[in-house]
Every structure is written in structure tokens, then in C-alpha cells.
Image: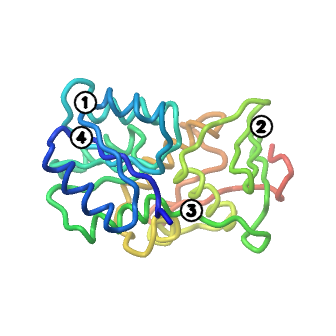
Amino acid sequence: MSAGRILVVDDEPQIRRVMRTTLTSSGYEVGDVRTGEEALNRVRAEKYDLILLDMNLPGLGGIATCRELRSRSDIAIIVLTVRNSEKDKVEALDAGADDYITKPFGTQELLARIRAALRRLPVTSESGPQSVRLGEVEIDFPARRVLSNGGEIRLTPKEFDLLRYLTIHANKAIAHRELLQAVWGPDYGEQVEYLRVFMNQLRKKIEPEPAKPRYLLTEPWVGYRLVSAQPGKTDR
């Protein structure tokens, strides 16, 4: 049984061959393309669970490709980059990536990042409320849907799981490390820039005034807190 379908997007044939061999031997079904334009066409035609996307692509470019993919899909995206500055990492996350990995990298690191990107928080009756309202926004956790005034708000899987964890622990300050390990996995804990970017994106989608958040609050030097009324009731 396949562990998932992965699309490798890289303009270097040797890297595509190595990635295909590595991922196939780990149980994944693998497709590969060399440009962002080809990636967009492939995703339109076929279903994938995750994309490994090189930052330095000819033509459309990795960041632009990531933004375009994210605008139409909630597929998991890991950006591959030779750049290691926080600015470049934040740019990748801000474009919609779930994670990034810096070249060169080892096989075990790559596989761990893939597992983290595909990781989803379970929704059970024991794991907190099944739904919650934040003002005009209604969140249905079993259906993984967010609605506002009759229209659907698209969240990425990681945005949704981050919101889910904060809701389970509503009205409590949750530390950065706890959030990272709950949503991304036990190998994470120091990547505070992940949370900063993802919280900014969530606020843009959920808060009436993102610059003055009412629900998704920063706890200085600690982490974040979701302010919520009772599950299923409107918080006004």
C-alpha cells in the first residue's frame, strides 16, 4: 500500500532521479517535473499528497509556483533551498509552504520532514469541541471546513491543525515548543518563525481586523492563545 503520492519539482535530472529512487524505496509513489509550469499542469491533472519544490526553478520560479499552488490547493508543500537565511525561510513559508529543507540534506532528514508535512491531528470526541464560532467564522473540525457568512475560507492543513490545537486548549497560553511539536512533530521546537508566519496567515483569514486580533493572541515570550466562547456558540 502506498505511503502517499509525491511530486518532485526540480530542474536537475540527477536530483530528480535520486529523489525518485529514495522515495520509492520508502513506499511513496513518485512523479517528477522540471519546471513550475509543468508542476501546475501536473497537479491539475493528477492528485498528489505532497510536493517537494525546489526554490531555484527556471521560468516561473519556486516562490511564484508555491503561491500559485497554494491559491488553488491545500496540498502539502516542502520547499527545497540552498539559502539558509531567516528572510528566505520566511519568504517560503509566507508563500504557502508547510516546511522547508536546506540543501544538502540527508535521506533521513528528508523523510522526517515529509512525515511531518503529511501529519494530521486526529479529530475525535475526546479531543475537544467538534465546532466553534469566532464572530462570523464557524469552524467544523470533523469536516475540516471553515465558513464565514456562507462562504468557505480555505486553510492549509497546517493552518487548520494549528487552529485545532489552540481551540482544544482555548483561553490558555500555549508555548511555542508545544505548538510546534503538536502540529509538526517531535523533531520541531525551535522554529518560532514557522508560528509567526502561520499565525499571521490565520489572522488574515479569520480575524475581523488582523492587525488588532481578538481571537488569536500573542503571549509575549511564551507563545499564543486562542480566546473563545463556548464551543458552537458565537463569540461576539
Marks 4/1 in contact by CB < 8 Å: the verdict is: no
Q: Secondary structure at mark 3?
A: loop
Which residue is most to the front? 1
* Residue at (27% x, 68% y) in the render: 109
The spot of residue 31 in percent (x, y) is 35, 46
Q: Amino acid at mark 4?
A: Met
* Residue at (64% x, 59% y) in the render: 164
Marks 2/3 in contact by CB < 8 Å: the verdict is: no
- Spatial distance from mark 3 to mark 1, Cα to Cα? 29 Å
First-in-chain label (2 vs 1): 1
Q: Which residue is mark 2?
A: 136
Horizontal side of 81 relative to 44 (left or right) equals: left
* Residue at (38% x, 69% y) in the render: 188
Instruction: Tell me which corner region of the image, top left, top right, bottom left or bottom right, holds residue 62.
Output: top left
First-in-chain label (4 vs 2): 4
Q: Which residue is mark 1?
A: 61
Q: Secondary structure at mark 4?
A: loop
* Residue at (48% x, 59% y) in the render: 118
Q: Secondary structure at mark 1?
A: loop
Q: Which residue is mark 3?
A: 120
First-in-chain label (3 vs 1): 1
Q: Amino acid at mark 3?
A: Arg
- Spatial distance from mark 2 to mark 1, Cα to Cα? 37 Å
- Spatial distance from mark 4 to mark 1, Cα to Cα? 7 Å
Q: Secondary structure at mark 2?
A: loop
- Spatial distance from mark 3 to mark 4, Cα to Cα? 25 Å
Horizontal side of 52 relative to 96 (left or right) equals: left
- Spatial distance from mark 2 to mark 3, Cα to Cα? 26 Å
